[in-house]
Amino acid sequence: MTTSESWMSKVENLAQNEQDTLLGTSLSRRFSKLPLWLSHPANIGSFYGLLVSLALILPYAFSGGNNEVWAVEWIYHTALLIVACALTGFASILLIAFSKRHPMAPPRYILYPMPFVGLALLSIDRTGLVAIPSLLTWALLLLPGPVYVHLSWAPRWRLLCMVEDGKDPFLGMEIKQDNSEAEEMAGEDTELLEVVDNFESEE
């Protein structure tokens, strides 16, 4: 049994709400299938930087500037993007190690359109039609990946590492029990409902 299989089997033995916290939604679940050394936040950040760089090929190749050296400029900027995104991943994992914060859902409706808007603005700027502030363009292109890594994946990766090491990432956390089923069973029995309410107030 491989390392990934061993910690995945431990995750499968947890409660459903704990599994959801560890594995997250579709994107994080895909990353969680990778070995933990490969899914390190710095590597995920680097991967995002590479994806952005690939999207920049056409704007760089067909810009109004010197097309003879566009490949050199693109390779240089690609290296900068990958290194910058990797460093933000390292910074996130260091901050999470101190804060012990659990994963948060990133604002997808804001983050997901940002790279496409940034790419469109960069294309307009490179063609010379309208001058777009470089800071705005690069912020739209770069922020979504590091924000996702910091809010969602870096805390989740830390918890998965704890599971792999045989530690309980939920130790000491208050587990809220759902008493709606008990209230449903009580129905219109007011005395039984009072017992349920008293039990909740004691907790």
Image (spheres, rainbow, N blue to C red):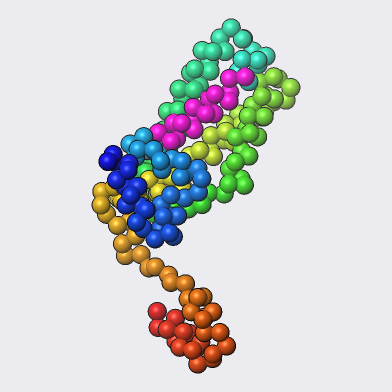
The answer to whether residue 99 is left or right of residue 76 is: left
Q: In this rendered view, identify the residue nearer to me: 15 or 120.
A: 15
Q: Position of residue 79 (x, y in %)?
A: 45, 22
> At 40% from the left edge and 41% from the top edge, which residue is drawn?
33
> At 54% from the left edge and 90% from the top edge, which residue is drawn?
189
The answer to whether residue 164 is seen in the rendering is yes
In this picture, is 39 found above or below 10? above
Q: Is residue 114 magenta?
A: no
Q: Main secondary structure of the magenta part?
A: helix
Q: Position of residue 60 (x, y in %)?
A: 60, 18
> At 57% from the left edge and 49% from the top edge, which residue is drawn?
107
Total numbered badges shown on the rendered structure: 0
Q: Position of residue 106 (x, y in %)?
A: 53, 49
The answer to whether residue 201 is seen in the rendering is no
In this picture, is 198 found above or below 75? below
> At 27% from the left edge and 54% from the top edge, which residue is drawn?
167
Q: Which residues are magenta?
A: 43-58
Q: Is residue 54 magenta?
A: yes
